[in-house]
Image (cartoon, grey):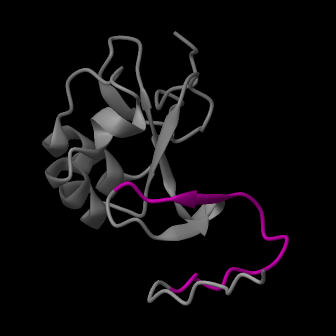
Amino acid sequence: MRLKARSGSRRKEELPANAGPVRSCIGCGARRIQAELTRLAVGCEGAVVVDWTRRLPGRGAWLCGAGCLAAAVKRKAFGRAFRGKAGAVDPSALGQALESGPARDGAAGGSGC
């Protein structure tokens, strides 16, 4: 018996071959190359923080930018992305951190708790 390929309405985004790891934004669900996304992680106190150095331990969640933050909060995506280990999510603090960019003094994380 021969199986037919499913012809769904969902189209895969065309990503360049061998461009690097691909991750999904927790806000909009878009699949992008890891270098284009911002990593979020659970900090030492259990709060969700922006991981500019991409070195904090544990699971990470990825966002396209500050615009997708509101969608992620609305969808309650942080609890799923961190498998229930995310403590307090402060959207205003995360939004300010995303818009300000990485800190130059090295205080953006990477201490490893």
**Dominant secondary-structure state across the stretch colored magenta:** loop
Q: Residue furthest front?
A: 1
Extreme residue in the right direction: 18
Does 37 sit above or below residue 48? below
Write down the region rendered in magenta.
11-26
- Return the x and y of residue 62 as percentages of the image width and height: 47, 50
Residue sitting at x 33%, y 16%: 46
Q: Is residue 2 left or right of residue 105?
A: right
* Front residue (pair 102, 51): 51
Q: In which quarter of the view is residue 22 placed?
A: bottom right
Residue 11, horizontal then vertical, whole percent: 53, 86
What's the residue at 63%, 30% (across, down)?
Answer: 55
Q: Is residue 55 magenta?
A: no
**Does 39 sit above or below residue 51?**
below
Residue 101: horizontal and vertical position, in percent? 41, 52
Q: Please say whether residue 14 is one of the residues in the magenta stretch.
A: yes
Say which residue appears at 25% left-offset and 20% top-offset: 87
| Vertical placement of residue 64 versus 83, above or below | below
Q: Quadrant of residue 84?
A: top left
- Residue 68 x %, y %: 29, 63
In screen coordinates, is 13 left or right of 77? right
Task: Identify the residue shown where x is 82% and y is 77%.
Answer: 17
Quadrant housing the N terminus? bottom right
Q: Number of marks in the image?
A: 0
